[in-house]
Image (spheres, rainbow, N blue to C red):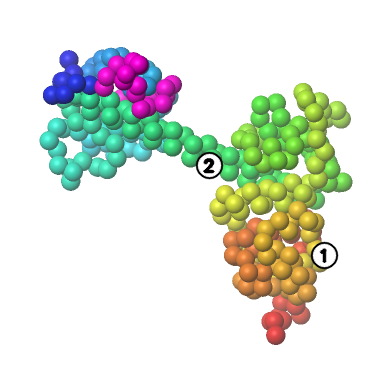
Amino acid sequence: MPEQSGHAGPPAAGPSSASPSPPGRALDIAALGLDARDRAVLVSMTRMLDGQAGLRLRWVEDATACTTLFVPHDWSQYVSPPRVLVRLTPRGATPADTPRGLSVASPLRVSEMTDVLEAAAALYELARGAVQREHARMALHALRDMLVGALLAGERRRTLFGLGEGHGLVVDFRTGDITSSLPQAELLARPLHVADPQRAPDVVAWPGATHTLRLSTLLWGLTHVLIDQGVSPRTINGRYQLIRPPEPAALARPSTPRLVTAWTQRAMGVGEAAAAGRLSAFEILWFLSTALALGIAVPATESQAGTTPA
């Protein structure tokens, strides 16, 4: 049986003892590398504490499908997020003996187990949010890469891009017109599951309204979102010049109009453009890659490449 602490565990929920934990949080608990006794105690305590402290607990055998994984204190294998690792440490172990992170002493006590499960639930929510945001960033980055790659390759066909959950967009690379199941603002804000592009059929129907977008406007929108999310751009060397100003969608960021004025007057590298526009090199690289894909920026000629600003 689990060892009991000297003080009572968390009080049962009631009119005079509401738990501070928000209701409805759920943890799927599993274990790896523990001996049979510790594992049996964990299974028993999971069942006993289910419903307490606002937590719904379930024991699962598949460690890859859990939210909270209990392991020995000396566990060294990587566990991918958002799963939360909890080390079962020998009672009385000093901090130097135990790696950082969540841990609970063995033999297990009810109050300590409740505390560590509440902490694990909070960490799981944080980790899950971070993973979802990273997946969203990756999906937007992938969509932009596919659109830019198609433009640079001279694609001219109508192409279907699946976005998950029955949504998608059809891009006509010849005209720059897009037919989408989502308005641009929602497309840029929602989690996407981008599928491999394929040739669009003659007729594409989606449930609900259909929205007309412009390829260039969508690319600038994707560029701004990726800048705001801190996604690293690819390095671009050399000197370039804008051959015409971009559309208004490109000018949403402060100082971009100043950059455009300077870059249409002379060829510049990334560092010069950053100084001229009072923007970071990070922002300049994203701006330049989009401008190159849309054909409004070109590499400097030999005479321009050797020119330095007065």
Residue 50 visible in rendering: no
Q: Residue at x 59, y 65 (%)?
A: 280
Q: Which residue is mark 1?
A: 244
Q: Residue at x 69, y 73 (%)?
A: 268
Compute the Cα span from label 1 to label 2.
35 Å
Q: Is residue 105 above or below residue 230?
A: above
Could you tell me which secondary element the residue under label 1 belongs to?
Answer: loop
Q: Residue at x 70, y 48 (%)?
A: 221
Residue 8 image offset from top left, x and y in percent: 19, 21
Residue 131 image offset from top left, x and y in percent: 49, 38
Q: Is residue 36 above or below residue 273?
A: above
Q: How many marks?
A: 2
Q: Is residue 34 left or right of residue 252?
A: left
Q: Which amino acid, by three-letter code, is at mark 1?
A: Arg
Q: Is residue 99 above or below residue 64?
A: below
Query: Which residue is the extreme one toward the bottom?
Result: 310
Q: Is residue 130 magenta?
A: no
Q: Which residue is mark 2?
A: 134
Query: Which residue is the extreme one toward the front?
Result: 16
Give the camera-side residue of 284 and 196: 284
Give the magenta part as a residue range. 10-36
Quarter of the view holding residue 180: top right
Residue 88 image offset from top left, x and y in percent: 23, 31
Give the camera-side residue of 102 and 150: 102
Q: Is residue 139 left or right of residue 35?
A: right
Q: Is residue 5 left or right of residue 218?
A: left
Quarter of the view holding residue 264: bottom right
Q: Which amino acid, by three-letter code, is at mark 2?
A: Glu
Could you tell me which secondary element the residue under label 2 belongs to?
Answer: helix
Residue 58 visible in rendering: yes
Q: Is residue 15 magenta?
A: yes
